[in-house]
């Protein structure tokens, strides 16, 4: 005698805020791995120790600018969860577009691994734009 039971898994809908917040986390992880992998390039650590990275002098201003760049994306993880929907929607669209522009500009002339990670970052940011643009509306 055969007794077969079928398991039905519960499928709860994930809200747009959680999706966008998770995409910001994903982008930051990709940022981190791109920077970590960059240190595996021959001569990269020596270049950083000499005070330059990719031909840019590492100054306090440079470190502050990079910190602000990463902090904005980091804060978006939380802000996406708490901002009012209309504000949240437009802030996510605007920042994602600005990050796409900066990632594309930074990828010019880079190695294959960096181009790949940059392409994935852009895809993640385009998903943020898509989810924010198509934010579900409720009836008044």
Image (spheres, rainbow, N blue to C red):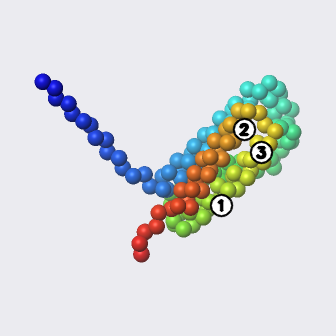
For image coordinates 51% across by 62% down, the residue present is 135
Q: Nearer the viewer, residue 89 or 48?
A: 89
Q: CA distance from mark 1 to mark 3?
A: 19 Å
Q: CA distance from mark 1 to mark 2?
A: 23 Å
Which quadrant, please, contains the C terminus? bottom left
Residue 79 visible in the shown view? no
Q: Nearer the viewer, residue 58 or 89?
A: 89
Q: Secondary structure at mark 2?
A: helix
Left or right of residue 48: residue 24: left
Q: Quadrant of residue 33?
A: top right
User: Disc 3 marks which residue?
Assistant: 106
Q: Secondary structure at mark 3?
A: helix
- Badge 2 local density, few (<14 within 10 Å), some, or many (20+)? some
Q: Please report whichever mark, 2 or 3, sits nearer to the chain's N-terminal start.
A: 3
Q: Is residue 87 above or below residue 32?
A: below
Q: Is residue 3 above or below residue 75?
A: above
User: Disc 2 marks which residue?
Assistant: 115
Q: Please report whichever mark, 1 or 2, sits nearer to the chain's N-terminal start.
A: 1
Q: Position of residue 73 (x, y in %)?
A: 63, 51
Q: CA distance from mark 2 to mark 3?
A: 9 Å
Q: Is residue 135 above or below residue 25?
A: below
Q: Position of residue 123 (x, y in %)?
A: 62, 46
For image coordinates 60% across by 64% down, the residue present is 90
Left or right of residue 6: residue 44: right
Residue 23 visible in the shown view? yes
In the rendered structure, find residue 94 and report the number of the disc placed on it.
1
Which quadrant, please, contains the N terminus? top left
């Amino acid at each position: 005698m055969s007794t077969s039971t079928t398991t039905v898994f519960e499928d709860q809908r994930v809200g747009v805020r959680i999706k966008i917040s998770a995409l910001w986390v994903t982008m930051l992880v990709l940022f981190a791995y791109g920077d970590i992998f960059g240190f595996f390039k021959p001569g990269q650590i020596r270049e950083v120790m000499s005070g330059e990275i990719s031909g840019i002098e590492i100054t306090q201003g440079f470190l502050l600018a990079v910190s602000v760049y990463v902090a904005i994306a980091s804060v978006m993880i939380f802000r996406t969860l708490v901002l009012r929907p209309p504000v949240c929607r437009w802030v996510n669209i605007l920042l994602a577009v600005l990050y796409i522009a900066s990632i594309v500009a930074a990828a010019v002339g880079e190695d294959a691994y960096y181009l790949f990670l940059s392409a994935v970052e852009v895809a993640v940011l385009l998903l943020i734009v898509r989810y924010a643009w198509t934010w579900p509306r409720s009836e008044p």
